[in-house]
Image (cartoon, rainbow, N blue to C red):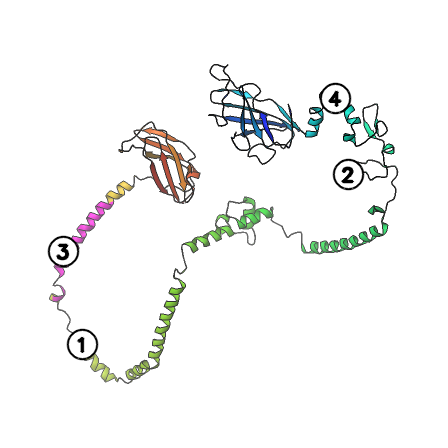
Amino acid sequence: MYMDVDAALTEVPVNICALIDDTDFKTIEDAIAYNAAGMDLVWNFVTSAGVFTQTAVTPTAAGDYDWTNQGNGMYTIEIPASGGASINNDTEGTGWFTGFCTGVLPWTGPKVTFRASGINDLLIDNTYSGRLDLILDDILVDTNILNDTKIPQTLNLTPSGNIGIDWANVENPTTAVDLSGTDIQLADTVTTNTDMRGTDNAATAAALATHDGKLDTIDANVDTLLTRITSTIFAGITSMAEWLGIIAGKQVGNATARTEIRATGAGSGTFDETTDSQEAIRDRGDAAYLTATGFSTHSAADVRVEMDSNSNQLASIVSDTGTNLPGQITALNNLSQAEAQTAATAALTDYDPPTRTEATADKDEVLAAATAIEAKVDTVDTVVDGIKAKTDNFPEAIQRNTAFANFPFTMVDSSGDPLTGLTVTATRRVDGGAFAACANSVTEVGNGWYTIDLAAADLNGTIIALRFTAATAQDRNIVIKTVV
């Protein structure tokens, strides 16, 4: 079967024989819909160069691959020329469909060869289809095909079967002939024509002179570059690309490049791209900025208010130091030794220190309070020991982006009773992303308990939301905060 390539095809056969029921092996299935249960349709294709491919195709009702019931168990499908989601009729070669669906025996379709429409027009859609001799005769005499070429004057058929053009017998030989795409191996005589740039010697010489000057400039520039680029400029560097990558990015880089970087200078460097690269330094700066570490969290208005307040206080201090303080300093300087001694003696005389009895009057009350506090501390210590005994049984913190095996959970009904024998669907939400299926399936343990092996991708975030659902069971929602 042959069809035109590069054309939108509305009815390409899907099966070569009627689709048959897989129970009695004889009943024709004449009502298969495009979305039948278990539909699995594959397009097999071999190019003219011998490249074989297989592509899954999803039939549609109003799209690129419309499925049509032709009756009596025969079906066809649409193939677009281009722009289709899976296959397109844009390559020469041979293709066929294979497939199966629920209740139907597997099937295969006829092999369809896709080639240029002109070939199909001559070999299939022609009056003489199937008669190669008549088709060749038609080509030789049909004025629409060879544009009034006369036989045998213009075309010469050699004994070996080759056809050549006798240019001497072509009508209107002075008319320009387009030989683009023609490989001319040898010409005995070429007539000089001013339209041919190769014969314009003056223009050719001028163009060569211009290019010669430009080549001299390029040569001088290359010489300059060679003097500036010494033979040792890249000494010690195996791969410049690896050097640049390890300096810029914090991903684990090339070991040879890391060793070479550490060997520069005194040769005792400790460069590590995961902490010392441009990306690693930037990430640490971003983290410090987001958490305001080392930065003020005040707004511009807050800073302005504080500055105004400080300005007012500074003005008061300046006023005091310029007026009141000098006078007080002067007065202090005028105090004599006798006056100072008299003031100190008066102060000591006026001081009435507490007696021993007065100082220890409430010691019993203090001791009783201390005893009560000690008892309470003992109680707290006992409670803390109990809490520690329980928390010691907690699982270790779940590591970020690291697989966690046998993560346990329970499934219960609306009354809180455990449920067994469930088919549990596990989904997860990583940070602010959408819920997606977990990498692994859920395994039942028993008595309402189930486990799942969480993959690294399931835990590649700070906050992980896990959701477990099953028919007749209450949804189980669990939130995890991972650690690095």
Q: Which residue is mark 2?
A: 180
Q: Look at the picture and state if 258 lies above or below 148.
A: below
Disc 1 to disc 2: CB gap under 8 Å: no
Q: Residue at x 51, y 23 (%)?
A: 100
Q: Secondary structure at mark 4?
A: helix
- Distance of label 4 from label 2 (alpha carbons): 29 Å
Q: From the image, which quarter does the C terminus lie in?
A: top left
Whole-angstrom CA distance, mark 4 to mark 1, is 140 Å
- Type of amino acid at the residue the image marks with label 1: Leu
Q: CA distance from mark 4 to mark 3?
A: 124 Å
The amino acid pointed to by label 4 is Leu
Please state the horizontal and vertical placement of residue 273, each as a whole percent of the image.
51, 48
**Quadrant in the rendering for residue 110:** top right
Q: Which residue is mark 4?
A: 132
Residue 327 part of the magenta segment:
no
Residue wearing tag 1: 348
N-terminal label among 1 and 3: 1
**Vertical relation: 77 (above or below) 211:** above
Of pointers 4 and 2, the one earlier in the residue sequence: 4
Q: Which residues are magenta?
A: 358-384
Label 4 close to label 2 by CB (< 8 Å) = no
| Secondary structure mostly taken by the magenta-highlighted segment of the chain | helix
Query: Mark 3 = which residue?
Result: 368
